[in-house]
Amino acid sequence: MDIIKRLVIWFLSGAALVAGGYAAAMALGLGEDKRGFVEFPTDLEIDQLKASPVSEHLTVVGRITSTSARHYRSVFVDLDVRDKDTLLVRCQQVHSGSVLPKGSRSFQVTCPDVLTSKVPAGVTFAATVSSASYD
């Protein structure tokens, strides 16, 4: 009987310790993050891509538009520079800020390894949203 009492006390002490730890974590804001994450979201569209002529390094500006009710906090964009069907360079994972629900915002991508003077005339730009986190 004495062993059963000790086991019950041990179990209750452990449960109280776990509950206290959980309460402390929630009070300190260390709980689980309710934000979502998505790769290649279909509700973010990129358009109006054009090269900025005033930069020494290749800089492309454009617009991201959200068609959903999500507030995207962090949006990452990949930029491809193509000459006809040939991929010349890819600038990857550039953070472009946040996008409000059903809103749009301008962004820019700078490729630090590409000089504007070395980019051939007639290249095309294609940008994709590679990942985004939302509330």
Image: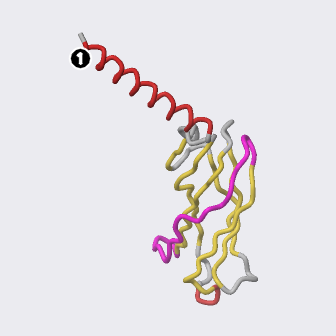
Colour scheme: secondary structure
As displayed, is residue 99 above or below residue 15?
below
Residue type, mark 1 in image = Ile
Q: Which residue is drawn at 56% across and 67% down?
A: 79
- Which residue is the extreme one toward the top? 1
Q: Locate residue 113, reporting x and y percent.
A: 55, 83
Q: Where is 56 relative to 104, above or below?
A: below
Q: Is mark 1 on a helix, strand or loop?
A: helix
Residue at 59 percent across and 81 percent down: it is 112
Whole-percent x, y for residue 12 in the image: 40, 21
Quadrant position of the N terminus in the picture: top left
- Considering depth in this image, is 41 or 50 the residue closer to the camera? 41
* Identity of the residue drawn at 57% across and 83% down: 114
Task: Residue lying at the far bottom in this picture: please name it.
Answer: 117
The residue range painted magenta reads: 83-103
For disc 1, the marked residue is: 3
> In the drawing, does residue 112 fall left or right of residue 10?
right
Whether residue 131 is situated above or below residue 28 in the rendered picture = below
x then y, percent, for residue 26: 58, 35
- Count the marks: 1
Nearest the viewer among 123 and 80 is: 80
Relative side of 31 to 11, left or right? right
85 part of magenta stretch: yes
Q: Where is residue 37 in the image (x, y as percent from the top left)?
A: 53, 45
